[in-house]
Image: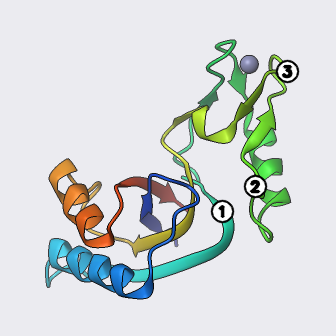
Amino acid sequence: MSDDVLSVIPTDPRWQPDPSAAERARAVVVGLLGADDGAELELTWHERTAAVDCGENLERIGCPHCGGTLGPDWWGDLLEEHAEDGFATLVVTVPCCGAETTLEVLEYDWPCGFARFEVEVWNPECLWFTEPQLAAIGAALGHPVRQIRAHL
Ligand SMILES: [Zn+2]
């Protein structure tokens, strides 16, 4: 049994909404999904910035400095290392070329992200939210958002 999780996260990995803004965003998401969608919603606040991984959808992580590829083992180890305590910093030295960069600028295909707040939509009927839908969620939340789709 596998799950698909569509996560909506603030574009700023350090930003968190207050509970009322989060509830407004949840209400917008529920409205967008429609009454027939059996998706389950979960709001999560992370104490420190957490990785929002796309799971089995991840095909490649590219380095913008050397054009190289960062292997799935490197990413897997990184996620494991920070699974409990999150990321105090997103600064990282990449093994491909030794550049000091940040995890945010690596090229994730499919997208991955970093966040201290997530609206997780479990097994929605839609594949992605549209740009206008994301804008509506962001307006309710009080911060622009992006989306990550994970296959678990
Ligand atoms: Zn590199």
The amino acid beneath tag 3 is Gly
Picture layout, residue 37 above or below residue 138 = below
Visible in this render: residue 40? no
User: Are the residues tagged 2 and 3 within 8 Å (C-beta)?
Assistant: no
Residue at mark 3: C-beta within 8 A of ligand 1: yes
Q: Secondary structure at mark 3?
A: loop
Which residue position is annotated with label 2? Answer: 79
Compute the Cα span from label 3 to label 1: 23 Å
User: Are the residues tagged 2 and 1 within 8 Å (C-beta)?
Assistant: no
Residue at mark 2: C-beta within 8 A of ligand 1: no
Which residue position is annotated with label 3? Answer: 98
Indicate the quadrant containing the C terminus: top left, top right, bottom left or bottom right. bottom right
Compute the Cα span from label 2 to label 3: 19 Å
Viewer-proximal residue among 134 and 120: 134
Viewed as shown, does residue 35 lie left or right of 6?
left
Which residue position is annotated with label 1? Answer: 50
Compute the Cα span from label 2 to label 1: 9 Å
Q: Quadrant of residue 67?
A: top right
Picture layout, residue 70 above or below residue 84 = above
The crowd level at tag 1 (other Cα within 10 Å; few <14, some 14-19, many 20+) is many
Task: Please tell me which of labels 2 and 3 falls first in the chain.
Answer: 2
Res 130 label: none
Viewer-side label of 2, 3: 3
Q: Quadrant of residue 65?
A: top right
Residue in view at x 24 percent, y 83 percent: 27
Viewer-side label of 2, 1: 1
Viewed as shown, does residue 22 lie left or right of 75?
left
Q: Secondary structure at mark 2?
A: helix
User: What is the x, y in percent for residue 142?
Assistant: 32, 67
Q: Quadrant of ligand 1?
A: top right
Q: Secondary structure at mark 1?
A: strand
